[in-house]
Image (cartoon, rainbow, N blue to C red):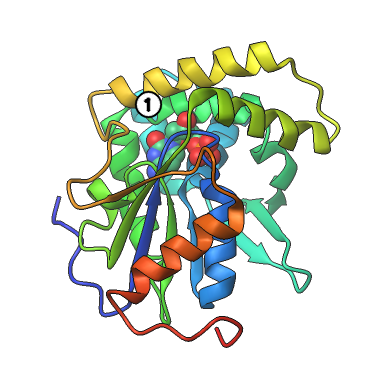
Amino acid sequence: MTPHKTPAVPVLAIDGPSGAGKGTISRLLSRRLGWHLLDSGALYRVLAIAAMRSRLSLEDIDGLARLAGEVRVRFVSDEAGGERIELDGELVTDEVRTERAGDAASRLARFPEVRDALVQLQRDFVRAPGLVADGRDMGTRIFTDATLKVFLTATPEERARRRHKQLKEKGIDVSLAALSRDIAERDARDAQRAVAPLVPADDAKVLDSTVMSIPQVVDRIVDWLGERIDIPPVGQA
Ligand code: DC
């Protein structure tokens, strides 16, 4: 696989474990910078949904890789800043966020053939004026020459607490203990898999957000980015 080559268009890679706040932070960064957003986890989740719908086993590597080349996924931003996700023309926004889809995504993400089938799709998201790429292997594999790589993390307890709060706000009632267990299991699976394990890139900046507020995290990343490229001041992005 050829490495990702020098970004004429800047890429900001945000990697890290589940519940570290990557989704929220990446979305805010993309708005503040006026850059496009790639939610790569959503691609794996949509693929998992497509597999479950076509009753494909999550162990059927060839079938999954083929499906990855066939699914049509669209991310559509509406004017209110919300985002819709479509799978083959059908709205799957809510289903994508379920724990079931996340768990299934983590399972199929173990297979190199499935990951390979999604590489080009992810690189095609690079478009001027820039891209914020949120995932697990954005800096280590997909965008190896990213302008800045951030590995965002937080303690497992804090990540479980954040996820719990997020689900509760959506009216989904899950016990904190069950969530902690799921997060620990998914962490282990994502970190130990043979391909693209969840590790920071050698040249990534590690940011532990456990005791930081969301605006503090965003500001820190924008500061780091500003040390590498010229970016518009706040409010002018
Ligand atoms: O970030 P998320 O929870 O939406 O991701 C769901 C699963 O997809 C996660 O458990 C691991 C997998 N994933 C991956 O392997 N590589 C990525 N770049 C993004 C997600």
Quadrant housing residue 236 = bottom right
Mark 1, ligand 1, within 8 Å: the answer is yes
Residue at image point 26% right, 80% down: 8
Q: Is residue 160 above or below residue 42?
A: above
Residue at image point 34% right, 35% down: 114
Residue at image point 56% right, 49% down: 23
Q: Is residue 158 visible?
A: yes
Q: Position of residue 207 (x, y in %)?
A: 39, 47
Residue at image point 55% right, 35% down: 19
Look at the image and tell me in which quarter the C terminus lies: bottom right
Q: Is residue 134 above or below residue 208?
A: below
Q: Residue furthest front?
A: 211
Compared across the picture, whether 140 is left or right of 21 comes to left
**Total of numbered circles in the picture?**
1
- The residue where tag 1 is placed is 190
Q: Nearer the viewer, residue 205 or 71?
A: 205
Quadrant housing residue 181 = top right
Q: Position of residue 71 (x, y in %)?
A: 51, 47
Q: Is residue 47 visible?
A: no
- SS for dot 1: helix
Kind of residue at badge 1: Asp
- Label 1: how many residues lie within 10 Å, few (<14), some (14-19) or many (20+)? many
Q: Position of residue 174 (x, y in %)?
A: 75, 19
Compared across the picture, whether 208 is left or right of 137 comes to right
Compared across the picture, whether 52 is left or right of 225 comes to right
Q: Position of residue 213 (x, y in %)?
A: 60, 50
Q: Nearer the viewer, residue 208 or 122?
A: 208
